[in-house]
Amino acid sequence: MLVAFSRPFWPLFLHVLGAMSLVGAVLATAIVSWAGWPRPGTAALRRTAFASLAVVGVPAYALMRACAQWIYSDEGWTGHGDPTWLGIGFGAADAGLLLLLVLLGLAFWWQRSGATLAARLVAGLSSLYLLLLAVAWLAMSGKWG
Amino acid sequence: MLHVTAAFFFVGGSVAAAVLNTMAIRSERPSDTAYLLRLVRRTLPVIGLGVAGTLAFGIWLWSDLGHRYGIGTGWIWASLALWVVSNALGGRGGRHQERARELAEELAASGDASTAELRALLRDPKGNAMSWLAGVATLLILVLMIWKPGS
């Protein structure tokens, strides 16, 4: 069994687990922020949006991205002639990091202030991030290109 | 691709439900608990699509790859068994959350002060264990799908 759970298993398993958990964290943030659209001052929604991203989303992103690099290194890719789906995956991950950090900052602002603008920006950006994640998983699982 | 998409819906929706449920348990006011538990319902269509899609597209994939994975492939049967276990436990965990939500809504309507009964219901180890064990079963399916023991 230990042999079966060898190197090829762990990076892929942890990469997929991280990606799926990240989708869940961003989905929870999107749900509470859209629910907060008509009442952005609700403390429970503000706390949940920030906690979901900080406690689940950021560690899940780190796991997903670190294991992506682990697989990339194991497979011997060099950046020359890499498949299209790989480029889409890395592009989505790197653009996603920026989006995740901005989202985290906005969720923190919403938690602290209860500002309507912050709630609406969190709702819009979390939905956009979900779309980006969907493109990434479709490209990678469908091996586009 | 469709099978993996369904898996993202299944696991992603379950993680979102777990986040909302955890925050509901940690809320001090029954109105907040009830509100967050109501929001758990919004994850159900996502989880439902994932549950149905993983089974339907998984069986489709299995029949397409019949030359590689025959009818006696153990890890696929184990995954199917875990899929049933995960759904059964998730359903029971969901009913426990519904009872907690109903009590929280009653308390929210009558002064919004928490009681020992609500706290006990929210932290009931048996009720919460159903949801967490459903999550463990889902995780084991993911392990089997990637490990493919014996293949």
Image (cartoon, coloured by chain):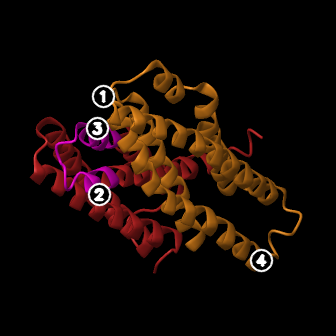
Q: Quadrant of the N terminus of chain B?
A: bottom right
What subunit carries mark 3?
A
Q: Residue at x 70, y 74 (%)?
A: B61
The overriding secondary structure of the stretch rendered in magenta is helix
Look at the image and give the colour of chain A.
Answer: red
Between A44 and B13, the residue placed more toward the observer is A44
Discs 2, 3 touching: Cβ within 8 Å: no
Secondary structure under the numbered disc 1 in the rendered image: loop
Q: Is residue A43 above or below residue A35?
A: above
Q: Which label was assigned to residue A17?
A: none
Circle 2 sits on which residue? A96
Q: Is residue B93 left or right of residue A36?
A: right
Pointer 3: what residue?
A: A44
Specify which label sits upstream in the sequence, 1 or 4: 4
Amino acid residing under circle 4:
Ser
Mark 4 → mark 3, Cα distance in angstroms: 47 Å
The answer for which chain carries disc 2 is: A
Inter-mark Cα distance, 1 to 4: 58 Å
Residue at label 4? B63
Of badges 1 and 3, the one in the foreground is 1
Marks 1/4 in contact by CB < 8 Å: the verdict is no
Bin the neighbour count of mark 3 within 10 Å (Cα to Cα): few under 14, some 14-19, many 20 and up: many
The amino acid pointed to by label 3 is: Ala
Name the front one of labels 2 and 4.
4
- Which quarter of the figure has residue A53? top left
Front-most of residues A82 and B109? B109
Q: Earlier in the sequence, mark 2 or mark 3?
A: 3
Residue under disc 2 on the same chain as residue under disc 4? no
Residue stretch in magenta: A31-54
Residue at 22% x, 41% y is: A42
Q: Which residue is mark 1?
A: B111
Q: Does residue A33 belong to the magenta stretch?
A: yes
